[in-house]
Every structure is written in C-alpha cells, then in structure tokens.
C-alpha cells in the first residue's frame, strides 16, 4: 500500500522519519480497501450482519446445542432465589408455605420445618454439583486471558471465548461446546479470507501490507463469534428469560410495577445505544486500523532487519515502531472513553428505575403486604427481568465492534477477485507442447499498462529466453503464463485453448517456476525440495539435487537432506538457495519450466552445468529463461526481446545482433563482450 510519512513528527530528535515504508496516519487511504475510508450507515451495518450468516450456517447444529444448554441453565436461574425466601419466611419466621412453594413442597414435608430444611439443603447440593452455584449471583466461566489495551489482545479473547453462567457439570459441558463452536466459527472465516489472499493475483500485493493481511486473517476474523453470541443467542435468551421470569413472578405475586420497570429498560437503553452506535462503530474501526498498522510496522521491520543493520538504523526504527504502537494504544483509550461516556449517560436513568423499584418494595413491607423474604424474591426477579431487557437494549451497541471487524473481512472478499474454486474450467488432457501469446496486454493497474500487443510462441524442444532492460516487463510477462496476472487484452493459448477457459489448477500443475528472488521455507531441505512434488521418491529428489549441483553442499551438512533451514533459507548462501529452488522445480517434472534470472547468483562453472541440464530438459518440454547475461542468451534457441512496453523482436542471438539494433544496444549497456 502507498504509505504516507509518519505523522510528520520528529522521531529521533533530528526530525528524521522512519526509514522503511513509514506507516500511514490513516491506513484506510489506500487503493485496495478504498471503501473503508468513510463511515458506515446503519443500513450498511445491518447489511454486513446479514451477509455474515453464511459463515454461521454450516455450524447451525452446534448453535442449536449451545442454545439448548443455555436454556437448560435458565431452570436453575429461576429457582435460585427461592431457597433464601423459604429459609427466611418458612424456617426462621415459621410462616406456612404458600403459593408455588406450597404446591411443590407441602406434599413432601408438610409442616415439618426440619424436613423442609433437608429438602432445601438437598436442592442446594444438587445445584452446587450441576452448576457450582448455590447463591443468586452465578459467576461466569470463560477463557479470557485478561484485558489488554490493544485490539489484538481483545480479539484474542474473542477468538477463544467459551462462556457459561455456571462452573459445575453443566457449566463445563457448555464451555466445551462454546469453545468448540467459537473455534469452528473463527476457522471458517479465517480460512476463507486466507484462501482468498492466496488465490488472488500477484498484483494485489502491490497494495497489500503483509501485516495488515495477517491482522485481518487472525484478529478481524474473531468478530464472527461475537455476531452469533451478541446478535443472535443473547437476544433470544433475553426474551426467553424475561417471559419465564414474569410468568413465575405473576404466579406468586401481584406486583405489576416490577416487570414494568424492567421492561422500560429496553427502549431506554436501546435509544442510547442507537445514539452512540455510529460514534462507537467509527472508533472501533480506527482502533482496528491502528492495531493493523502496528502489526504491519513490526512485520516489515523484522523482514528488513538486514537492511536496518546495514545502515545502522536500529534506534531510528525502534522509535518509529514505538510511535505506531502508541497510536494504537491512544486509539484504544479513545474507544474506552466513548464507552465510559455511554455508561455515564445511561447510569442515572437506570439508577432511577432501580430506586423506584426499591422504594415500592420497601413501602409494601412497611404496609405489611409482603415479607422480607418476598423482597429478596421480588428484587431478584426484578434483576432477572431487568438484565435481559438491558441486554436486549444493548444488542446494537454491542454489535458495533463486530461490525467494524466484519467490514474489514468483507472488504477483502469484495476487493480481491473470487478464486476459481469450482473447477469448472477445462482440464489439460495432454502434455503442454505449445504456448501462443497473441496481442497480449498486461498491467498491474489498468491505467498504466506494462506491456501491450505482445505476440510470440513457445514450443517443446526449444530452449527459449526473454531478454530486455530492467523494468521492461519480462517478469510480468512470464507471470501471465500460469495466470498469476490476468491479461487486459489479447490471450494466451495453451495447446490451442484459451488459458482463461482452462482450470487454474490444470495449468499450474503443468508449470514450475524458479523466481528471481527465490525463498525457501523454514523446514528441512528435503521438505523444501518435495514442496511442489510431495509424492516424489527420495531417489528422484537426490537426482534433481545432483542435476543442479545442490547435492554437493547438501551432503556436506551434518544432517544432509534433513538439515533444517532458517527463515527464508537464511542459513544458505544466495547461490545455494538458487540451486535448491531449481532442484525443487525440476523434481516436479513439469511440462513448462520457467526460470526468472536463474544464473545471477551462480558462478560460471555452475551456470554452464545448469545450461546443459536445461538443454536436456528442453528436448521434451518447454523451457523459458528470463536472462540478462549474453552467455545465457547465446546458448538459447530463440530469444524474445522486450523493450518500451512491447515485443521488439524474436530470433536467435546471432539474428538479433544482426537485425535488431535495440538488442545490440542492450547488450552494450550490460557490458557484454559476446556481441559478434
């Protein structure tokens, strides 16, 4: 992404800015996710919630199980206040049982208070085993690791949320079900977004920070669980809880003011939530962006640590990252401030409702119409009805955080081209023997074409090369063959069929690449060599390594082919990494082998040996080399010379020297002596 200077602030006392790709003040100002630069309307926010249902739908059975367990817990919620009322009124004050307790308990204990105590104690013991709770304030059980003042910390908690109101057997079962459901939901979103990144054209990564992509995959994905719990389960549970509580309460008492006060909490809190919704949504969006900026800053500097050390900029980059990190913290503090203002506005009104209810209950006690045990019961049921109404009213407010994460998820799915997953394209039944490029136009941005009107052909049995000045579009051209980049105009024919009509997997299975800046994985040498051909035998692997000259240095290592490589193959020299990369491509036994500047890190003897290998391979397949060296070009059967955005000429090295002045000038510029 195009990044602006780091806030214009003086970072090291000398007015210097960050050396490496300074993080923009507003990460939304980029071409890839340009839609994120404006505030969402309420209609758009609701639309995001509705469009997220496909992520939840595959897990609807587990959602139903979670809801069933939560409903089962309501039985204990509703009965918890009764033991205390019975002890106060019917045991201590010796009042006779009445109402629901009499209907249920009198047939068991009659007027025997000792038996009544025994029954209540047994009920509390059973409750303790099943729920771990014997009072009226059950404690939640979850996997939160503490609240950190950063978006990533909060997202980690959301991604590992397994909550229940209980800590007994029912609670443990519900936590297990919830954890499993949460992880499955997260994985559904995470793998969908990750797969979209992997399958997107390479041009996407000209605008995509790796750190931002990681943040969207790892942290924004966790919002889907909040959507389910806050947007679906919690409202449904709140309605059920209110209905059950008012049913039980009206069966025992005639106190209509208590449920009325509880019900008033719903529109009151919902109105405040609607007023604060947009402000909160925008601030959460900014907080996620700042968290993404911080992760991108760390990732980029660690990736470029060699450059930082080479220029002695450690202190400067530490200060730069520190500034980005503080901006993330400051954004989180502003978010907390918004929540605190919301609470300050709401608390007086809620407090007034509680005060009215308390005054009414005390007045009833003084008048002798209810007992102290009744006060405990009524106050508890009032809270039982008030809490779900408050939760229901808070639903929109709670969803603002998840909506911001969903927006960043759907931005990826909308901005990046949909992958070809259905396999509807044609398959390649025969080996690739001919590739024809016809009037091809390529660009990373449709407004600025890299190549235009390019036509040439590649045939098996011919060792071909593409040459041209730096920036002429050579790499772009070879990337179009396996459809890493889609053409703006023209076409590429493979065995006579338009490549766009062929399944991506069918094309890429037949093509092997050796890139200009080859990277290896931090696993063993054998695993790296087998990466493109996991089923290849060890004998074939060793033969491929021998063909490229890699076997010699591999066998000198203490663990040989089992030697573990560091990040991006850091334990190897550039030349050794290139040999392994070429061996990896050869092991795949492709129909088409494309090598982008393969000779650059090789010494003359290794280059000569590799050219002999490529010559043998070209006898039965298409081999294409992107090269600058005249020695390499002279050894090829045909050279396609590109310059100034087009194909200038094609022919042998000798023919181009004789008939193409631009090619001769190009070799002169490279200092080549092979121009005759």
Image (spheres, helix red, strand yellow):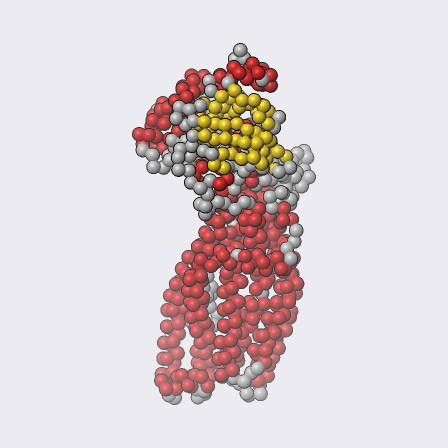
Residue 618, quarter of picture: top left
In the depicted structure, whether residue 656 falls above or below residue 458: above
Residue at the spot x=42%, y=62% of the render?
Answer: 61
In the depicted structure, whether residue 534 falls above or below residue 230: above
Residue at the spot x=57%, y=26% of the render?
Answer: 647
Comparing 408 with 316, the one in front is 408
Q: 601 left or right of 408?
A: left
Q: Position of residue 413 (x, y in %)?
A: 54, 49
Residue 304, quarter of picture: top right
Q: Residue furthest front?
A: 496
Q: Is residue 430 visible?
A: yes
Comparing 251 with 345, the one in front is 251
Residue at the spot x=37%, y=72% of the render?
Answer: 126
Q: 7 left or right of 369?
A: right
Q: Position of residue 248 (x, y in %)?
A: 48, 80
Q: 78 left or right of 212?
A: left
């Amino acid at each position: 992404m195009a990044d602006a200077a780091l806030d214009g602030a003086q970072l090291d006392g000398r007015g210097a800015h960050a050396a490496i790709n300074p993080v923009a003040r507003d990460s939304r100002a980029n071409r890839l996710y340009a839609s994120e630069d404006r505030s969402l309307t309420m209609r758009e926010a609701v639309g995001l919630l509705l469009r997220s249902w496909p992520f939840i739908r595959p897990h609807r059975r587990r959602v139903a199980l979670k809801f069933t367990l939560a409903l089962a817990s309501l039985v204990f919620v509703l009965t918890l206040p009764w033991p205390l009322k019975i002890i106060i009124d019917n045991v201590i004050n010796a009042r006779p049982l009445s109402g629901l307790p009499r209907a249920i308990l009198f047939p068991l204990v009659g007027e025997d208070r000792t038996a009544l105590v025994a029954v209540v104690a047994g009920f509390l013991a059973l409750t303790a085993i099943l729920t771990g709770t014997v009072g009226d304030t059950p404690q939640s059980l979850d996997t939160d690791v503490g609240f950190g003042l950063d978006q990533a910390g909060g997202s980690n908690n959301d991604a590992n949320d397994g909550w229940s109101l209980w800590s007994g057997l029912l609670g443990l079962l519900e936590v297990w079900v919830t954890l499993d459901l949460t992880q499955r939901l997260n994985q559904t979103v995470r793998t969908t977004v990750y797969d979209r990144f992997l399958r997107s054209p390479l041009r996407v990564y000209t605008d995509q920070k790796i750190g931002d992509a990681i943040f969207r995959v790892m942290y924004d994905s966790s919002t889907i669980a909040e959507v389910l719990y806050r947007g679906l389960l919690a409202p449904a549970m709140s309605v059920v809880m209110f209905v059950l509580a008012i049913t039980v309460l009206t069966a025992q008492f005639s106190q209509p003011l208590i449920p009325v006060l509880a019900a008033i909490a719903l529109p009151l809190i919902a109105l405040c939530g609607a007023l604060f919704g947009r402000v909160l949504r925008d601030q959460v969006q900014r907080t996620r962006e700042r968290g993404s900026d911080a992760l991108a800053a760390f990732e980029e500097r660690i990736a470029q640590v060699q450059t930082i050390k080479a220029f002695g900029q450690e202190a400067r980059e530490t200060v730069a990252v520190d500034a980005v990190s503080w901006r993330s913290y400051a954004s989180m503090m502003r978010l907390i401030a918004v929540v605190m203002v919301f609470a300050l506005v709401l608390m007086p009104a809620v407090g007034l409702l509680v005060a009215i209810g308390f005054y009414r209950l005390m007045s009833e006690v003084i008048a002798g119409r209810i007992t102290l045990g009744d006060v405990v019961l009524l106050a508890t049921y009032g809270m039982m009805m008030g809490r779900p109404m408050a939760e229901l009213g808070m639903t929109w407010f709670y969803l603002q955080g998840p909506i911001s994460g969903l927006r960043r998820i759907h931005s990826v799915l909308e901005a990046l081209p949909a992958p070809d997953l259905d396999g509807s394209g044609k398959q390649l039944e025969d080996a690739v023997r001919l590739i024809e490029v016809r009037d091809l136009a390529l660009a990373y941005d449709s407004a600025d074409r890299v190549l235009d009107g390019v036509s040439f052909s590649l045939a098996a049995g011919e060792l071909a090369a593409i040459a041209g000045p730096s920036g002429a579009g050579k790499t772009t051209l070879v990337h179009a063959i396996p459809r890493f980049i889609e053409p703006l105009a023209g076409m590429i024919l493979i065995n006579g069929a338009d490549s766009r009509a062929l399944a991506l997997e069918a094309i890429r299975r037949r093509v092997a690449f050796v890139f200009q800046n080859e990277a290896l994985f931090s696993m063993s040498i054998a695993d790296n060599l087998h990466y493109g051909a996991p089923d290849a035998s060890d004998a074939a692997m060793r033969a491929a390594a021998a063909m490229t000259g890699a076997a010699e240095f591999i066998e000198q290592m203490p663990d040989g082919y089992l030697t573990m490589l560091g990040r991006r193959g850091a334990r190897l020299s550039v030349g050794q990494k290139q040999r392994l990369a070429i061996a990896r491509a050869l092991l795949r036994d492709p129909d088409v082998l494309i090598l982008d500047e393969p000779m650059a890190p090789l010494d003359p003897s290794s280059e000569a040996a590799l050219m002999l290998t490529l010559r043998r391979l070209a006898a039965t397949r298409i081999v294409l080399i992107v090269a600058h060296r005249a020695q390499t070009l002279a050894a090829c059967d045909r050279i396609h010379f590109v310059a100034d955005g087009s194909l200038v000429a094609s022919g042998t090295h000798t023919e181009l020297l004789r008939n193409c002045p631009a090619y001769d000038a190009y070799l002169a510029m490279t200092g080549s002596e092979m121009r005759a």
